[in-house]
Image (cartoon, rainbow, N blue to C red):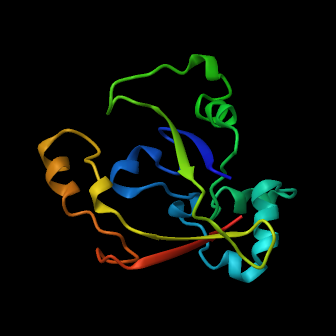
Amino acid sequence: MSRIYRGDKRGNSTLPQLYRTEGIHSKLINGGNSAYVSQVGLAQAIKVHVSPSSSVEKILRSKSSFLSFSLDFERAKFYAADQHPRLLNPCDPYKETRYIFSLDTNDFIETRDQGVFSLKYECDYELVRPNALTMPDVILSGYVRCRFCKGGREESTDCFS
C-alpha cells in the first residue's frame, strides 16, 4: 500500500468543503449512532456499509461511521464527478465543488483482524486553512482545535478496514 483515494463533492452529507478546518467527516456527522459498530461488531458494520441488503441497512449506511476509499485514483474521480470524470476541471482555490482526498497508507498497522488497520496520528494545526478568504474565517481558523485531543499534541488512533 502507499496511497488511497476518496472522491467527494460539495453538498454531500460528509461536508467535504470544510476539510481546511475540519478534516474529512463520515456520515455519522449527520446524526448516526456512534455506538453502532460496537453493538453489531466491526465485520457486520463493514458489511452493511459496503453492501446494504435491507431498507434498514440502507438507512444505517446513510449515517455510517465509515468512509469509502479506493486504491484507484480513477475510481475516486468517478465518484467526485457524479460518475462523469471527464467533466472534472482544475479550478482556483476556494472555488472548488469536487474533492479528491488522498491518504498515505505507509504508516498503517494491520491489526489481528485481516484487512483491518490502525493508524496513530497527531493533529497538525499547521495544516489548518480558513474555509473562505473572509476576515472572520481567517481569524476563526486560528482557533480550530480537535474535539478529541482538545488542541494538544496527543496521539490519536483510528481503526478501519
- Residue 99 rendering spot, x and y as whole percentages: 50, 37
In the picture as drawn, the residue positioned furthest to the right comes out as 53
Drawn side of residue 107 relative to residue 69, left or right = left
The answer, for residue 133, to whether it is visible in the render is yes
| Total numbered circles | 0
Q: In which quadrant is the C terminus drawn?
A: bottom right
Q: Compare residues 3 and 133 and report the one nearer the observer.
A: 3
In the displayed structure, would residue 38 be above or below residue 48? below
Q: Quadrant of residue 113?
A: bottom right
From the viewer's perspective, is residue 161 above or below residue 153? above
Q: Residue at x 40, y 49 (%)?
A: 19
Residue shown at 54%/21% (left/top)? 88
Q: Position of residue 41 (x, y in %)?
A: 77, 78
Who's the residue at 52% across and 60% down the image?
A: 30
Horizontally, residue 120 falls left or right of residue 1, namely left
Residue at the bottom extreme of this rendering: 39
In-image side of 140 versus 75 (left or right): left
Image location of residue 93, percent across then percent down:
32, 31
Residue 56, can we see it?
Answer: no
Give the residue displayed 68% in from the left and 76% down from the top.
36
Question: From what the image shows, is residue 152 above or below residue 94?
Answer: below
Residue 22: give x, y in percent of width and height: 38, 57
